[in-house]
Amino acid sequence: MFARLAAFLLLTTWAFAAAPAGVPRELAQERAAEISNLRYQISFALAPHAATTAGHEELSFTLKAAQAVLLDYRDGTVQRMTVNGSEVAPTPDNGHLHLPADKLRAGANTLTFDFTSAIAPAGKPITGYEDKDDGSEYIYTLFVPMDASMAFPCFDQPDLKGRFQLEITAPEDWTIISNTEPRGAESAGGNRRRTAFAETRPISTYLFAFAAGPFRKLESPGVLDLPGLYVRKSKWERAQSEAPEVQQITKRGIAYLSTYFAQPFPFPKYDMVLIPGFPYGGMEHAGATFLREESVLFRTAPTHNDLLGRDLLVLHELTHQWFGDLTTMRWFDDLWLKEGFAQYMAYQALDALKPSEHIWMRFYESIKPAAYEIDSTQGTTPIYQDIPNLKDAKSAYGAIVYSKAPGVLKQLAYVLGPEHFRDGLRLYLKEHLYGNAEWGDLVRAFERVSGQKLDHWADMWIRHRGMPQLDVSWSCTEGQVSRLSLSQHDVLGEGNLWPIATQVLLSYGNAGPGIRFRASFVTATANFSQAVGKPCPQFVFANDQDYAYGRFLLDASSRVEVVRQLGDVHDVFLRALLWGSLWESVRVAEMEPRRFAGLAELLLPGERDELLLRSTAAHTLTALHRYVSPGTRGQFVPSFEKMANDHMLHSTQKDLRILWFRTLRAVAETAIGRGYLKDLLSGKLSVPGVELRQLDRWNLVTALLALNDSQADGFFHAEQQRDRTGDGLKYAYIAAAARPDSKTKQQYFVDYLHDPSRPEDWIAESLDAFNYWNQSQLTGPYLKPALQALPQIKRERKIFFLVDWLDAFIGGQQSAASQAQVHDFLRTADLDRDLRLKILQAVDELDRTVKIRQKFPQ
Ligand SMILES: [Zn+2]
């Protein structure tokens, strides 16, 4: 620790001065001001199935003035440590090592360490994965946001970038992938080999990584300049046929982004490594992105949109190479900056690379709902989140960062116009090459290129939480619009007003082309003279093309008209926006859920757009499983089962057949519906032209178990016999979590909290089966224990797990009694602010469910 804190420590003497937990912002700022020129030379010795790795490190850096310094290292042990040549007894202290002032000097300093760090299947940043298909072992690192300091001693903060030279000793048949190319390999004796990597460019500790094991590289004979793609050897043949598209889209993405950012690819090479059971979709290590294997090699029969989703994942991680890796946030309070842009740019790049794919509609369907769902709750946060200590950076991850931030950036691109938006990004990157920057730097870059003042815009959208609801009001006289106004109010009732720019549509249905105009305002209400005198429309929609961010409900007369003619709206993007607006009306208890289900029953059979069919079917299932009474559900389910089965068999589009198959599995409930599922498993029924994959089959088994079908156990055991792969073990674990008996639930719950050997992805993926929609009686008793376990979950699990946990356990309940239980817990439990907000986010859906059921008891 430095300057002010160091002085304090010296006064109190080392023996009693406790180092702070984590990396507080003050410590980071002081270190960043004093330390520069960092170089890490690190070697690890890896062995299959070992619980630890021995490491050696030489760390050099320049110090402005001789002073005591705190280095970060936790969880492991240091056997030997030298500071500028003299041996110093390591003094582990709350996740740090003290470097005494009398051994350090102004100018260059060199430290060495011999240390031992842990490797484990879960809960450690060096993860070991055993491939149950062939018994081979894989080891990979995942340090974000501040876990590099669990693997080796370092200054674990994003704005102390270092140059890394890695050396790894491992079995000679292993392949090692890291941020740079190997510069040499030699025998280390005993069938072991030492691989040394070229020095990296300056990168943050969280972007340093390696993966090791019998990975194989995809071969692409005759194709030049493709980025490397590595996969474990048991999946190599499959990847060979399914994954080359990933390399192609990456290559095209590199060309597009280099031009768009006016910066060449910033690192010496680019590889992607498919990691089984990886806890995120991907992680953008500089020059070596790790991707979740299941996100590339699909476990269920993929649809066209699944493949586009894979493109977006690949482009998201690729964008980070510039936005995040080349220019890095100074601190994790600007996490949204890199995630928001990676998300937004992935869509923009794909829109440029595949212009006929309705990419912005996909953005609306995939990105916006998650943002609105959180942002309309009392648990929401501003996009900018104060992170006083990096140990709390995990809390910043979530839909606000991944969904609201890109949604707001789409609004900003509309405000600035595409050229100024692009030029601002170019300027920002150019001024911070291989360095760090903050949101304010980007705002200033946008202001400089556009000449527009953005401080109010940035303040309201980035620093204030919540969102506006936009209501449109209009009237006609003698066939012409006489008045049109937009008004906004803060969904959370906190009195905020946002600067809004949107495109308003006056629609004449099929009677003629619509009239569109731009509407910008910052006040509570504004009149728009652009509309006055135009022919009286059939309906008005105030967020055409989805440029704006907020809740856009239809006015009463427009809603009547939209419900009447929705099936005839040919523009698929507009159709999606109108369906989305109706669904919002259901969620705010303005439209009866059974009316929504009735509209879906009428229109879904004719819907040809895969994405729109998927979202509307999902909303309908939510309405049936949560919002309507069992009696009403019983009226709808048989017709949806039959509809799904018919279209699964007879739709002319393969993607739609797959989607109807998934819908059938989700909606099936009656004996007839379950019969379809069993026929699919036994082979009496098949989806034409589609080969069901193993996870498709397991999902059917899960549904049968959850629905307590009398033959479910037989199908479960047959599937276990059939699928003897490593994945099969996991899927059986997930399926069995859906068994509707109290003993099963109890066993699983104990397992979730107390079995350290259970891989985290098994647990995460079984939470929804455990909390199946029809099992609230059985899972209700676990609601409170699940809430009580939150501090442990937060401490032990990876970033997204906690939200999945909360959504599953609270989402499994629908009753007012459960709602009261959660709110009672919020009132009485001693919780940190972050956990309180996360619970408030998750309970919002339960609050809505109870409200909707009370208002529409049918
Ligand atoms: Zn990202």
Image (tube, rainbow, N blue to C red):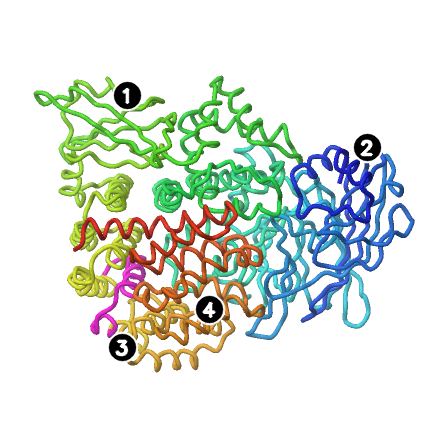
Q: Tell me the kind of residue under disc 4.
A: Phe
**Residue at numbered disc 1:** 526
**Residue at numbered disc 3:** 684
Q: Is residue 615 located in the magenta-colored stretch of the structure?
A: no
Q: Tell me the kind of residue under disc 3.
A: Lys
Label whose residue precedes the other's in the sequence (2 or 1): 2
- On residue 64, which mark appears? 2
Q: Which residues are magenta?
A: 651-675
Q: Is residue 150 left or right of residue 564?
A: right
Residue drawn 41% across the image and 65% down it: 782
Pointer 3 and pointer 2: residues touching (CB < 8 Å)? no
Q: Secondary structure at mark 2?
A: loop
Residue 193: x %, y % from top left: 77, 65
| Residue 309 drawn above or below residue 255 | below
User: Which one is in front in this view, the residue at disc 3 or the one at disc 2?
Assistant: 2
> In whole angstroms, how far apart are the C-alphas of marks 3 and 2?
76 Å
Inspect this view and state whether residue 36 appears. no
Q: Secondary structure at mark 1?
A: strand
